[in-house]
Structure formats: C-alpha cells, structure tokens
Amino acid sequence: MDNKTSSEKLADYVYDITYDVLDKRVKEKVSLLFLDWLGSALSGANTNEASILMRALNEQKGFGNSALIGYGKQDNATMAAFINGFTSHIVEYDDTHRDSLYHPGAPTISAALAIAQQIRASGKSFINGLVAGYEVGIRLAASVNPSHYSYWHTTGTIGCFGAAASVASIAELSKEQCVHAFGHAGSMSAGLWEFQNDHAKSKPIHPGRAAQGGIFAVLLAKEGLVGAKSIIDGKQGIFAAMTKEHSLKPIFNRIPNTYVIEETTIKVYPTCGHTHTPIDAALDVHTKISKNINMINRITVKTNSIALKVAGNQNPTTANEAKFSIPFCVAVSLAYGELNTKSFHDSMIFDPVVRQLMNRVDVISTEEFNKVFEICRPTRIEVLMSNDELITSEIKYRRGDPENPVGKDFIKNKFLELNISNYPLGFLEEIFEFCRSLDQINDMRELNNILAAK
C-alpha cells in the first residue's frame, strides 16, 4: 500500500523530470512562455506600481547576480524573485492556466530565473526547472479549485509550491529536501481576494511573495530545516485549511504521460482572464454591426458567476479597475473593434462613446455556463438594436487557450508591442534570440549582458 503523502509523490515527480526525457514541443513551449514572461516583466517595470515598489525597497536591496528585469541591474536571488514576480503580473498580460484558475509564469519563472542566475545554471537546467514548477503548480492549483478561489488568490498561494518545485529542480535538491521545501512553501502560502472589494492594488504582491517564498523554502530545506511532509493533505494542511472541497485526481492524473504546461494559455488581451471570451464575442459582434454603434439599445453578456464576481465592475475609473471590468472591455471592443494596452488610458476609460455603451451592458451568470466552468469559459453576447434586430455571438474558448492557440509570431509581436515604446528594437530582438536558443545557454547570467545594454 502506498503511504506516501502528496508532497512526497510530487517530489518523486520533480525528481523524474529531466531535460533528456522532455518532448521537443514541451521545450519549445518553455521558450515561448519565458519570452512571454519577459515581455510582461519589462513592461511592468515601467509602471507607477513598479516605481512605488522600488522606492519601498530602496534600502532593502543588496548585491547579487540575479537580474532585475527592466532595470539593467542585479540583486540577490530572493529580492530579484520578489521584484520580478511583482512586475511581471502588473499589466495583467502574463500567462494563465484556465482549468486551475492560476497564473503559473509570474511566480515560477521569477523564482527559477533568480536561482538559476545565482548558481550559474545552464539553459537546459532552467528549462527543466520551469517544467517542474509549472507541472507542480498547475496540478496542485487544479486540485484545490474552484472552492479555494473563493477567498484565496491561487497565484499567491499555490504559486509558492510551483516556485519551490522549479528552484528545487534547478538547485538539484534530493527528494527528501524537496518534500521539506514543500512543507515550508505551504507555511508561506498567502494571497487574499479582499483587495478586489475596494479596488486596492495588492495583487502583484502575491506572485512576488510566492516566488520569493519558493526560494526561501528551498534554501531552508537544503540547509536541513525540516518541513511538514503532509502540508498538502494533512489534517491542518492546505486542503483542510484552504478548501471546502478538493480532489487528488488533478495532481496525479496523467502522470507521467502528459505535461500540463502545454495547456498554459498565452493571454491575447492585457486584462483579467475572465474578460477574454466577452471581448472575443464583442469583437465578433463589432464586425456584424459595422459602424451602427449608435443603434445599440441593450447589451446582455451571459457568462459564469465567478467571472461576474471578479470582473463585473460596472463603473471602472482607473486602468486597473477597467482591466477587471467586463462592461468596459465589451464596450471598447464593440465601439472600436480592438482592445490592447492603449485601451486603458484615461482618454478611453472616460470616452463618451464607451461610457454610453457601458451603461447599456447587463452582465448575468447562467447555470448553463456555470456547469462547464471547470473546462471552458463560454460567453454569449446579445446586442439589441434600435430596430429590434438581435445580434449575437457565443465564444466557447478564449483565443490563446490550448483549444484555440496562438502561434510563435503572435507571441513575438505581443512582446514587441508591449515594449517597443520603452526599449530599442535591437535590445528586444536580442532577448527574443536568447529565448529562442535557451537550450544552448551555458550560464543563465548571460542574459544580464543583454539586459544591462538596453
């Protein structure tokens, strides 16, 4: 009889993931996810929130060899992981995993890059670590959700485990040390949704602290500090404390034959993921109504209850609020036939046409869409025109989801579009080439030579 805890089984899995056994498509996926993460981190470094963070940490920063993305500087691994985890999540453009309600890249890559540069790990070791981190994080997130998501921001809580798994792999911990690292990660898991209720800006702290916590967990375990072996499924562990219901099936199902990292969604809009099928549907309707925007009487958006709760803001007044507002995103998409980073300037948020359309939007949840929430995110938009014509569109899968993927060219163009106004094209092209040849890199500190020359 197998008496191993979930942590022990996951440690076995981390230990069994080696570069040589990874499929070529998995390795290519890692390179694209890394490029996508770098795009968000570079862009996030140029925001007001990042400026606040850097001022707050001014006297805390130290010395090291781990890159602070967007600053051309380095710091110690724990500080770099926190800063990069924070900045890579600010613009709401970092990757996500639909079925687990989790952003794996921000905590996992931030931790993995920081430790890889600290110990001069190779690109192959880095790739291996990212796969381990994504696999552990996504599988564990899927096991606790959707009930966990009612109060806890999965990216902050489970992100600490994903970060710890990636760092444990890169730092070559033993299985026993990895188990102890998971025990410490569980004690550092945090991130509450309350910030949403008064539109606070705490959200990027969650992946930052998760990335930092993952490194701390590994360093402590490597030096011999014992962690709880049953932190996941013990009587006072993650399952017991943070979920109303959970399942072990998502963790261990399809191991070792499937890599869930391949199911990661590349975001095509810089907004909360719950707004994406509403945006897709609104853009589709836009093509049907042409320029007859002034004929719109009523807009009904049918979605699921979680989307309504997280992104139902009817009257956003800031860019951050607008990114969590289905009415705003739908109004912009209907009015102008596009939604991108430029859509979140004050000129658009308070645009008279957008405001008028927002006032005509009703967002409702349906039992039909609630039932399929764990496998897809359908949205149906019904637009009633002044001539009583009803124009509709229903989208089942978001662009960027594994069932509706985007290609390499889109990811590169997204990376450029996010950053071309702040960085020279040659600098961005060098980063792209670094990611493309990741498996040929002997020392991940080589990235610092590019970043310092911006």
Image: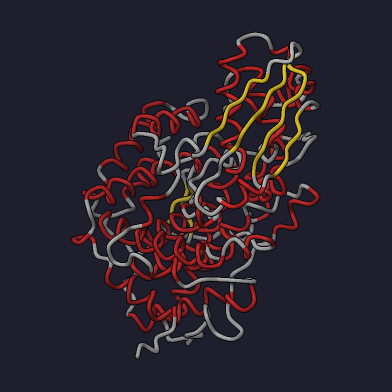
Residue 318 point in image, percent of width and height:
75, 35
Residue 257 point in image, percent of width and height:
27, 62
Residue furthest out toward the top: 291
Relative to 42, residue 208 above or below = below
- Give the quarter of the image for residue 354: top right
Query: Residue visible at 46% across and 39% down?
Result: 39
Foreground: 435 or 311?
A: 311
Residue 153 point in image, percent of width and height:
63, 59
Query: Residue visible at 55% across and 67% down?
Result: 144
Q: Is residue 303 left or right of residue 427?
A: right
- Give the quarter of the image for residue 320: top right
Relative to 143, residue 51 above or below = above
Please give the count of numbered marks on the rendered protein.
0
Residue 129 point in image, percent of width and height:
34, 62
- Give the quarter of the image for residue 50: top right
Relative to 160, residue 361 above or below = above
Foreground: 374 or 322?
A: 374
Q: Quadrant of the C terminus?
A: top left
Q: Report the coloring of the rendering.
A: secondary structure
Relative to 205, residue 322 above or below = above
Query: Residue visible at 37% across and 84% down?
Result: 176
Q: Quadrant of the N terminus?
A: bottom left
